[in-house]
Amino acid sequence: MVTRRALLLGSTAAALGAVAGCSAPAAPGAAPVPASGGPASGASSSPGSPSHSAAPTSPRRPTPRPSPEPAVPFHRTPELADVVAEGLDVPWGLAFLASGDALVGERGTAKLLRVSPGGRTRTLGEVRGVVPPRGIGEGGLLGLALAPGDEDTLFAYITTADDDRVVRMSLAGGRVGRPRVVLAGIPTSTHHHGGRLLFDRAGRLLVSTGDAERPGLGQDRSALSGKILRLRPDGRAAAGNPFGDRTWSYGHRNVEGLALDDAGRLWATEFGDKEADELNVIRPGRNYGWPRVEGRSDVRGLTSPAATWSPTSACSPAGLAVAGSTAFVGALQGRCLFAVPLDGTGAGKPEAWFAGDHGRLRTVALAPDRTLWVTTSNTDGRVEPGRDDDRILRFRLT
């Protein structure tokens, strides 16, 4: 089978969708990035910072307001330690085993890999029923999550010929078993799948779903799209959900990052349309505004984000991990790792690290040894990859 990576490496065509974010080479250390507002923020461009251009606005939407910027110090500084693995094909889902090894899913090939901290990589098998994306589509084998206390049961978010769905598989004997449906019927499209999975402290499965390029579904509480869902492991609605169904929060466009902080609060990264990308603290039953608003607003009944990036070319926030009082965000268009200081449910100004050094960054995960593993996404069809792409990078937090 000819992989997307092989096709891209053989092409000399101009990169698709390469919009400058914070991709200018960074000077040693970090470069501050405005949390919101683009040129209106009055911040000048600096190495490692996003280049800002006027963002299209819609007269039907309230004007986004800047994120609050409490004076919160960073408590974690990332330093590149090494490259754990390379030559991968759009690594998307990542789940750690207690041993420190990671289960990694390749989005298009549907292969499930086991990667050791020392870089040993072996294929456990392929997840059956996955339909790979076409062109610059975004479906395939997406989020992964291990069942709490059971490393032989893996949950995955996948795209099929008919829908997006959550499945579970046995990993007994080091082999990938037949997927069993947990939740089917999530609307699908070329883009906006969501796809991240995370178990909360109560053992309930959190699932982020995109709006499937049908914005109105985000406000339809009966629809599965444009939501963060909270499920029992068998797929039924979890007890304590705010509306008595699977919905935990709604009004989302495309959430690809979910993480819990030390206090058990749920945080999510969300792709905006043109005005603002978001970092949100998620509260049950809240409406996060899409498609009525992007970014902050005063509209009654809508929850504003804790931090924003404007315009959306400055970030495109994908994966998310929280270490202490810092949220780390992988930026696709921004091509950097953002560190966002947290203060309870508030957030300070995002700061860009490693701007342009590694290309598009997607999944961010905190390993058992408290290092940060970050996957690149340079073989996804939007840029021309390097010969060792895609990679898993490891960062020390100091």
Image: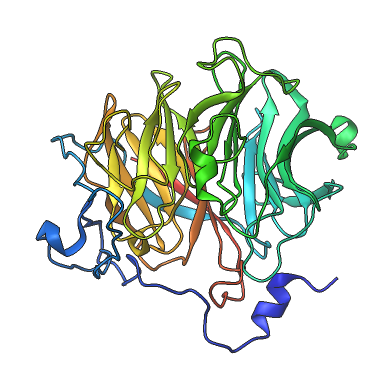
Q: Is 76 in front, or is 47?
A: 47
Q: Quadrant of residue 185?
A: top right
Q: The C terminus lies in which quarter of the figure? A: top left
Q: Position of residue 347 (x, y in %)?
A: 25, 36
User: In the shown orientation, is residue 44 left or right of residue 4?
Assistant: left
Look at the image and tell me whether residue 368 can be seen.
no
Q: Residue 184 at what x, y percent from top left?
A: 76, 36
Number of marks in the image? 0
Quarter residue 42 falls in: bottom left
Is 137 drawn above or below residue 263 in the view shown? below
Which residue occupies 57% across, 75% down? 386
Choose between 95 and 298: the one closer to the eye.
Answer: 298
Q: 86 or 117, which is in the foreground? A: 86
Which corner quadrant of the image does residue 396 belong to?
top left
Residue 88 point in image, percent of width and height: 67, 61
Q: Residue at x 61, y 34 (%)?
A: 223
Tell me: residue 55, above or below residue 317.
below
Residue at the extreme bottom of the image, as rendered: 12
